[in-house]
């Protein structure tokens, strides 16, 4: 059988409306999760006047606040080791990832098994889109993918 140029049939061949609907559904779930699980995100969303149940469509996302690296550092210092943005129980963290592409103190995020699975799926999809296939090998001196 010939090689396909599609990595994930369901997502890559869905219509624009199907993609938008799926993205909005996932975004609503994520907003609800972080609102209920993280003081950091709940405070920021409250300040922006966003409540997860009031999120109608992707257009509402433009009202969402964005955190800066300094916001994350400040909130991590206030509540080590991961800061007030941690949205899962500490026991669910299976990998600690340092984020420091700039000078200064690195910030850390705790990744769950699901986080790693989503990250790996995204990374594989990106590599597939660039033409890499299972028979190919890559050499990387900086690992930005979950191990």
Image (tube, rainbow, N blue to C red):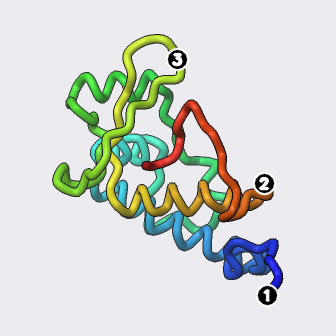
Q: CA distance from mark 3 to mark 2?
A: 27 Å
Q: Is residue 139 above or below residue 33?
A: above
What residue is rendered at 51% in x and 46% in y? 145
Task: Tell me residue 43's x, y (percent).
Answer: 34, 42
Quarter residue 85 falls in: top left
User: Disc 1 and disc 2: Cα gap in Å?
Assistant: 21 Å
The percent position of residue 61, horizontal first and vertical second, equals: 60, 54
Q: Which mark is residue 1?
A: 1
Which element carries disc 3, helix, strand or loop? loop
- Depth check, front residue: 96 or 83: 96
Residue hosting label 2: 130
* Most distant residue in the top direction: 103
- Which residue appears at 35% of the width and 55% of the height? 35
For discs 1 and 2, the disc positioned in front in the rendered view? 1
Relative to 73, is 28 above or below?
below
Image coordinates for residue 45, horizontal then vertical, percent: 43, 47
- In the image, 44 versus 27, the foreground residue is 27
Residue located beneath label 3 in the image: 102
Q: CA distance from mark 3 to mark 1?
A: 47 Å
The answer to the question of whether label 3 and label 1 lie on touching residues, with beta carbons closer than 8 A, is: no
Residue 119, given in percent of the width and then of the height, sits at 51, 55
């Amino acid at each position: 059988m010939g090689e396909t140029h599609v990595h994930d049939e369901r997502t890559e061949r869905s219509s624009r409306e199907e993609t938008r609907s799926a993205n909005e559904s996932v975004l609503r779930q994520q907003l609800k999760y972080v609102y209920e699980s993280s003081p950091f995100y709940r405070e920021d969303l409250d300040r922006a006047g966003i409540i997860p149940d009031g999120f109608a469509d992707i257009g509402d996302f433009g009202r969402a606040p964005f955190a800066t690296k300094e916001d994350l550092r400040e909130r991590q210092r206030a509540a080590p080791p991961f800061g007030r943005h941690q949205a899962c129980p500490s026991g669910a963290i299976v990998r600690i990832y340092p984020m420091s592409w700039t000078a200064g103190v690195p910030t850390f995020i705790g990744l769950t098994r699901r986080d790693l699975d989503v990250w790996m799926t995204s990374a594989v999809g990106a590599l597939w889109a660039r033409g890499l296939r299972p028979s190919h090998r890559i050499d990387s001196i900086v690992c930005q993918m979950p191990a």
